[in-house]
Image (cartoon, rainbow, N blue to C red):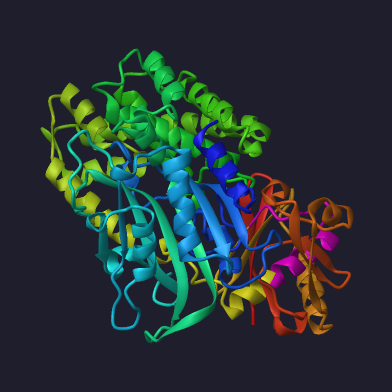
């Protein structure tokens, strides 16, 4: 039994219900491009909404994080990873949560207690020191010398500047063959964090006022890849059983050993795996120059560049062979991989062909700028990178063939300036957390249901939601359609939505079995992501959909609906942007 199965089996035995992994692309959180943690899809329930499966939940969640993209290639970082999590929504709290974690680690995984160390929240002027967690760990046999009290920077969780918050307790493992020190030093990198239990027991307002929550929640997270490395006794995540098949295949395809070529091989494996997961997602993401599509394009192209660096024939089927290996490894856990295998392989094939054409254009530009000069300046080198995808290594390689020098320092200066601009522009995109779901966003969620219903009437019953994004400024809705909407069609859609708003139709909420909901005519996006018990929102006889919410109680709360833009999203998919005035 592997780690995912062991984890789920244990927490189900403790009264938890397993919920399916949400898609990688979040449905109701516009603040991030991808689900970055197991708690993210549960935001409405952590905020107080009643979950159809009750108060004790567990799962393994597909996650994609981009904050460490530049670190991919080392021993521990991944863009895609699986997060094991268990939650208490107003049920058990610190003591039980810690006892469950301890039992799973020491009894099920048989980790020696002497290899464990703990951090807890040291408290401040508003929130007391977390002696409950510390004393619970002591009662389980963790010595005082192995418990460290740390401040907000390390052991406190809050979604931005306000929201549900609280201290956490982190569990560390001694990942070294050196003698285990008696006293735990959190700064010693040989101690590796393997599990984090967050205790949401307070609410902090924008002005810093802190009050206790009526519903106190537990949110835990354990990174699968890191824990497998701990259990298998290796200090390189890519040497674990998780990566064994793709690693051996890549050695065969490149005719090179992993040792000595680790960085490029790690990047190739990581990026192809992540690309497979994104391309297979029900949201239908395709490589593009914006949002999730841009990330997918960047990952595929970076993998191609490193395959080239290893001397591989990038026009061969190396990428699809690796993709098929990852699909085979994960399809029993994520059914969309099996369902969308052809989609994934086609995405990789088309993007590879497109990138190779781009490389050819870049080589022509290189030929032009390298005439009558003995060097490639930093600005040109960065232009080749930014426009044509030339890594500095490729530029240096081609330049060397022509006995040209490359201004690497100038390149890196421009590269850093570009990164800083991108980071500044992306603050809102990657902040994540519970800061969404404001009143206006709640109105937009309901308006999306009305828009879906109106499009079915105007365009046809085959219309359905293929993706959505909601901010405080507008809603965005993707749907299948083979033509650009006419002005008459857009006007008819607007009029229908506004008629339903003016009618003041109640929005009702029910919890029922998924099969019963589908049989009753309820529509849903990504049926496989929903558990057996679901929440159904009904708007009169206009709309009936499975949804996690949140929604208004009556359509009259929405205001005036207006389409601001209608455009192509991808082949056969149209996109509407609309506002509520």
Residue 444 in the image: x percent, y percent?
A: 65, 73
- Which region of the structure is painted magenta? 446-467
Q: Is residue 464 magenta?
A: yes
In the rendered view, does 464 fall on the left or right side of 67?
right
Q: How many marks?
A: 0
* Residue 350 in view (yes/no): yes
Q: Is residue 456 magenta?
A: yes
State the residue at coordinates (32%, 53%).
Answer: 142
Image: 26 above or below 91: above
Residue 174 in the image: x percent, y percent?
A: 27, 42
Which image quadrant: the C terminus? bottom right
- In this view, the residue in front, 190 or 178, is 178
- In this view, the residue in front, 286 or 21, is 21
* Residue 290 in view (yes/no): no
Determine which quarter of the picture holds residue 475.
bottom right
Image: 446 above or below 324: below
- In this view, the residue in front, 420 or 87, is 87
Residue 319 in the image: x percent, y percent?
A: 47, 25
Determine which quarter of the picture holds residue 112.
top left
């Amino acid at each position: 039994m592997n780690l995912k199965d062991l984890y789920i089996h244990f927490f189900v035995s403790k009264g938890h219900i397993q919920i399916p992994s949400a898609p990688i692309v979040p449905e109701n959180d516009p603040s991030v491009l991808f689900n970055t943690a197991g708690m993210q899809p549960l935001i409405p329930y952590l905020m107080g909404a009643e979950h159809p499966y009750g108060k004790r939940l567990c799962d393994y969640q597909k996650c994609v994080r981009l904050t460490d993209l530049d670190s991919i290639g080392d021993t521990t970082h991944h863009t895609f990873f699986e997060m094991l999590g268990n939650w208490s929504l107003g049920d058990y709290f610190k003591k039980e949560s810690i006892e469950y974690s301890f039992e799973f680690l020491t009894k099920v995984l048989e980790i020696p207690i002497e290899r464990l160390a703990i951090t807890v929240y040291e408290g401040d002027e508003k929130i007391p020191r977390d002696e409950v967690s510390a004393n619970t760990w002591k009662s389980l046999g963790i010595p005082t010398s192995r418990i460290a009290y740390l401040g907000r920077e390390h052991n406190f969780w809050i979604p931005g500047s306000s929201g549900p918050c609280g201290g956490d307790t982190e569990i560390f493992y001694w990942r070294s063959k050196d003698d285990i020190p008696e006293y735990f030093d959190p700064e010693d990198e040989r101690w590796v964090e393997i599990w984090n239990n967050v205790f949401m027991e307070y609410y902090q307002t924008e002005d810093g006022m802190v009050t206790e929550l009526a519903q106190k929640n537990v949110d835990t997270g354990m990174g699968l890849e890191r824990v497998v490395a701990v259990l298998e006794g290796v200090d390189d995540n890519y040497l674990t059983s998780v990566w064994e098949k793709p690693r051996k295949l890549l050695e065969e395809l490149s005719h090179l050993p992993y040792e000595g070529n680790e960085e490029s091989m790690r990047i190739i494996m990581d990026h192809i795996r992540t690309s497979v997961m994104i391309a297979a997602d029900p949201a239908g993401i395709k490589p593009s120059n914006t949002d999730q599509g841009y990330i997918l394009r960047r990952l595929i192209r970076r993998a191609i560049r490193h395959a080239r660096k290893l001397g591989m024939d990038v026009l061969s089927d190396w990428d699809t062979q690796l993709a098929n290996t990852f699909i085979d490894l994960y399809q029993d856990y994520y059914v969309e991989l099996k369902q969308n295998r052809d989609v994934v392989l086609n995405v990789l094939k088309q993007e590879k062909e497109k990138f190779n054409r781009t490389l050819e254009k870049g080589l022509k530009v290189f030929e032009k700028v390298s005439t009558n000069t003995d060097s490639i300046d930093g600005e040109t080198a960065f232009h080749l990178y930014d426009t044509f995808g030339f890594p500095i290594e490729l530029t240096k390689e081609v330049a060397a063939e022509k006995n040209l020098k490359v201004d690497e320092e100038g390149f890196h200066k421009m590269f850093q300036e570009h990164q800083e601009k991108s980071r500044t522009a992306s603050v809102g995109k990657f902040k994540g957390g519970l800061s969404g779901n404001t009143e206006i966003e709640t109105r937009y969620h309901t308006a999306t249901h009305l828009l879906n219903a109106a499009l079915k009437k105007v365009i046809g019953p085959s219309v359905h939601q293929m993706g959505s994004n909601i901010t405080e400024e507008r809603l965005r809705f993707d749907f299948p359609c083979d033509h650009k909407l006419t002005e008459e069609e857009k006007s008819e859609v607007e009029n229908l939505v506004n008629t339903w708003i003016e009618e003041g139709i109640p929005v009702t909420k029910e919890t029922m079995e998924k099969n019963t909901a589908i049989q009753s005519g309820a529509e849903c996006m990504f049926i496989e992501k929903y558990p057996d018990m679901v929440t159904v929102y009904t708007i009169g006889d206009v709309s009936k959909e499975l949804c996690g919410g949140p929604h208004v109680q009556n359509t009259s709360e929405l205001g005036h609906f207006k389409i601001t833009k209608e455009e192509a999203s991808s082949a056969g998919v149209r996109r509407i942007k609309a506002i509520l005035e």
